[in-house]
Image (tube, helix red, strand yellow):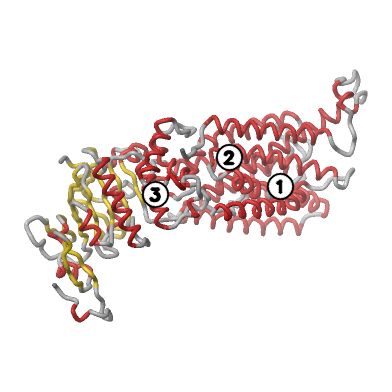
Amino acid sequence: MAQVLTARSLAIRVLLCLAVLAVVMCVCALVGSQKISLKKVFAGPGRSPGENIDYEILVGIRLPRVVLAALVGAALACSGVVLQAILRNPLADPYILGISSGAGLGVIIAVISGLTWSFCGGSPLSVFAFAGAIATVWLVWFVGHFTGKAQVTSLLLAGVVINAFFSAVIMFLTSIARSDQVYSTIFWLMGNITEKNLSVLGVSAGCILAGTIGLFGVSQRLNILSLGEQEAKGLGVDTAKTQIVAFALAAFITAIAVSLSGLVGFVGLVVPHGVRLVAGPDHRQLLPISAIIGGAFLVAADTLARMIVAPAQLPVGVITAIAGGPFFLVLLARYSRKISWLK
Amino acid sequence: MSSIIEVKNLSFAYAPHRRILEDVSFDVGAGAFLSVAGPNGAGKTTLLNLLCGLLGPQAGSIMIDTAPIQSYSARRLAQKIAVVRQEFVPVFDFTVVEVVSMARTPYLGTFGFDGKTDRDAINQALEITDTAQFARRSLRSLSGGERQRVFIARALAQNTAIMLLDEPTSFLDLKHQVGIYDLLKAAQLEKGKTIVAITHDINLAAQYCDQILLLTGRKPPMQGRENGAQNHPGYLIGKAKDIFSPEQIEKVFGVRVFAGKVGKENFFIPLGRFAKDSGQASIS
């Protein structure tokens, strides 16, 4: 008999992927420019700071960073899946509706203003990036709905136009900024995983997890929405409500990811496609597995970023683009062949 | 036979001075097969969109199973009416069984997993439509006829009393056209489905349907041939043999036809100006 996705088979696959993520996170936490010995780590923290350096590096620096990379990767991959479904466009990524330029604008404003305060443990850069991203998404949604009835097309157009406009403003501000300000802006735009304090990490993890679970709740409706609005309505889906919920949650977790790490490219485009090629397009499965694999992918990429030119570090966005592209081509070639052979 | 669809004085316009449907009234009995025919732009698809709740009536009313269509939530309406639109290919590469299982959405909870009832409905629909053999293949890899059967399987798995279809046989070869109509007729006779299908093929409609609704657009139709057909400005409803005549078709569709008979039903071959036998394109 034909097979449909059951809760049990999904649970098994998700657990398997979580195991892969755990292994990747452990391995990546252990490797780095500074060798650490597990024996020393298990001896626990010393009585005074600096006594057990291996423990401090692993627990204080590498683990938070690995967790951060996993969170950002999960949020971006998840958001990519959702936007591709809502916009019915395989080329959509989390930044397609202007989040990137909005966050970038927020960042350059924060940099030029020379702000030094912090808000709930977040730097002005993070706070401004988050605010810029959310404000832009709201603007795109508002303009998209204001201009026309064919919502998907007008949303995309509004996103492209607002992206272009804000990019122009970013270029203008960059051209009048001091060179050190330009450097920190560009470094941020490339995407970076840097250490964050634990409270920021905790709050972000809670938000991203809640957002992902919320999106999983609409994942069956995303399947149907990806067929088109008429089809979805015919199957009893409240399309407007589903679109708003999915869009808002995807924008929210993307904004958090962007405020944590800048514009890490490629994860939100490549991971959903890669997972779709292997596991199929059913969003009930695609969404959680993409989130987990996205997390693992970014953890691995960030480890490479801090090892390739150690002790210096590359922006992780460079690695995701360089490694992600060929990896995706291999997947595409391998599975396209398999599919055509099946025909 | 009680009516499951009752349309009363229905009017609809996309723009104030461009009425598509005006004062249309008809009933469809439970378990009946109605074909909606008419020239392009006469409002067939608009009528279908009104019947499935995608558009709201601007005047008049539509009752589904004795309740006004507006009183249904989207989910409850999807438990009553299944829609098969003109053939399309989804953006993402869903398999046949994934597409058919989407039919169960109106019955699922928040996280959307199929239970045993759902799986039974899906498997049964796949078997009836003879699509179980390629259930795990990608929908994109199928031919047009096979794909259309998959969409009918989806409508059957939706387990509704009413099925609405928008030109289910367009783009299909003769064998597949007949195959689709056989499938629909079987669903009507064996499962008691009420079927409303838009069609351009008046010959197939005459052979398979209980009633024809001929929307005539801006050209008022001639009288129905016999007493069976009800005549209104803008549309005509009744049995095929009462509605389709060479004169009627020429008036409504603007094309001359050659007419013949298969059993009790008439058939028509349209013949244009350069057709080989257009000289004899006349009433036989």
Work out whether mark 1 precedes mark 2 in sequence or the reverse, and give the earlier one: 1
Residue B140 in picture, x, y percent from top left = 49, 54
Query: Could you tell me which residue is drawn at 62 percent across and 55 percent down?
Result: A337
Q: Residues within 10 Å of mark 3 (few under 14, many from 20)?
A: many
Residue farthest to the top? A47
Q: Are marks 3 and 2 on the same chain?
A: no
Give the residue pinned by disc 2. Answer: A287
Label 1: chain letter: A
Q: From what the image shows, is residue A14 above or below residue B36?
A: above
Residue A215 in picture, x, y percent from top left = 55, 37
Give the residue pinned by disc 1. Answer: A264
- Along the line of sight, the residue nearer the viewer: B265 or A184: B265
- Along the line of sight, the residue nearer the viewer: B182 or B70: B182
Circle 1: residue type? Val
Residue farthest to the right? A51
Residue B233 visible from this viewpoint = no
Q: Residues within 10 Å of mark 1 (few under 14, many from 20)?
A: many
Q: Residues within 10 Å of mark 2 (few under 14, many from 20)?
A: many
Say whether marks 1 and 2 touch (CB < 8 Å): no
Circle 2: residue type? Leu
Q: Nearer the viewer, mark 3 or mark 2?
A: 3
Label 3: chain letter: B
Under circle 3, the secondary element is helix
Query: Could you tell me which residue is drawn at 39 percent across and 44 percent down?
Result: B154
- Label ID, residue B151: 3
Q: Is residue A150 left or right of residue B227?
A: right
